[in-house]
Image (cartoon, coloured by chain):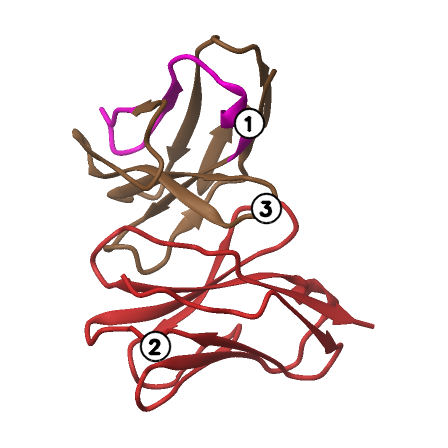
Amino acid sequence: DAKTTQPPSMDCAEGRAANLPCNHSTISGNEYVYWYRQIHSQGPQYIIHGLKNNETNEMASLIITEDRKSSTLILPHATLRDTAVYYCIVKTSGTYKYIFGTGTRLKVLA
Amino acid sequence: NAGVTQTPKFQVLKTGQSMTLQCAQDMNHEYMSWYRQDPGMGLRLIHYSVGAGITDQGEVPNGYNVSRSTTEDFPLRLLSAAPSQTSVYFCASTKDGGNEQFFGPGTRLTVL
């Protein structure tokens, strides 16, 4: 599975959009991009995943570049409860080995 | 649905002791897995199972055993605990090939 690179930390003002980048330059054609987050010491929570088209759900939007070498997770109106570590993971759908990495620690500021 | 449950929440062991971390899910998920998370690190896959009677190794399997006799349960056994196994352990399950994993609340293990 391809490796991902994320900034170690980011700040975002409450109510503003949080844009979390992820580089995955070695991604292959059948690999999906997944995002999870971990709030404090809880178990990680699934956010969204995509292959090449942009995806949106009730939590976030996922924008994948046309060459698929990078992506951005967008939290449209960040709240204090979105403070968490966000993990970008690349994985082949149907396989089960997730490689989590160290993620981006997002701090939402009041 | 209770989702994914883990017991115990906290455990302290002495070096050399053995114990079993319990994990259960009531969502009829085929896939279950165990991760460990050391301070300041991401999660690392220990073992996983794609169905009852089938298990396989992840990134860091040494020192741990698993079995899967039912769909619901996936216990993790530490045969002879070592201080290097001090960590937070998470169990997860998923229905359909790993698209959305559901995680348990974790077990915080300290080995003295």
Amino acid beneath label 1 = Thr
Residue, disc 2: A25
Q: In this rendering, do the residues under marks 3 and 2 share a single chain?
A: yes
Extreme right residue here?
A110
Q: What residue type is labelled 3?
A: Gln
Q: Distance between the residues labelled 3 and 2?
A: 30 Å
Chain of residue at mark 2: A
Mark carried by residue A42:
3
Q: Nearer the viewer, mark 1 or mark 3?
A: 1
Q: Mark 1 points at which residue?
A: B86
Chain A tint as drawn: red
Position of residue A66 measured from the top left corner of the image (x, y, whole percent) = 32, 91
> How far, Cα to Cα, is label 2 from label 1?
34 Å
- Chain label for disc 1: B
**Quick check: B8 left or right of A1?**
right
- Residue type, label 2: Ser
Which range is magenta? B66-88
User: Viewer-nearest of labels 3 and 2?
Assistant: 2
Question: On the rendered structure, is A104 left or right of B57?
Answer: right
**Does dot 3 land on a helix, a strand or a loop?**
loop
Tell me what hue chain B is rendered in: brown
Residue A29 percent across, percent down from the top left: 20, 76
Disc 2 with disc 1 on a shared chain: no
Residue A109 placement, left or right of B104? right
Q: Which residue is drawn at 69% across and 63% down?
A: A81
Q: Is the magenta stretch mostly helix, strand or loop?
A: loop
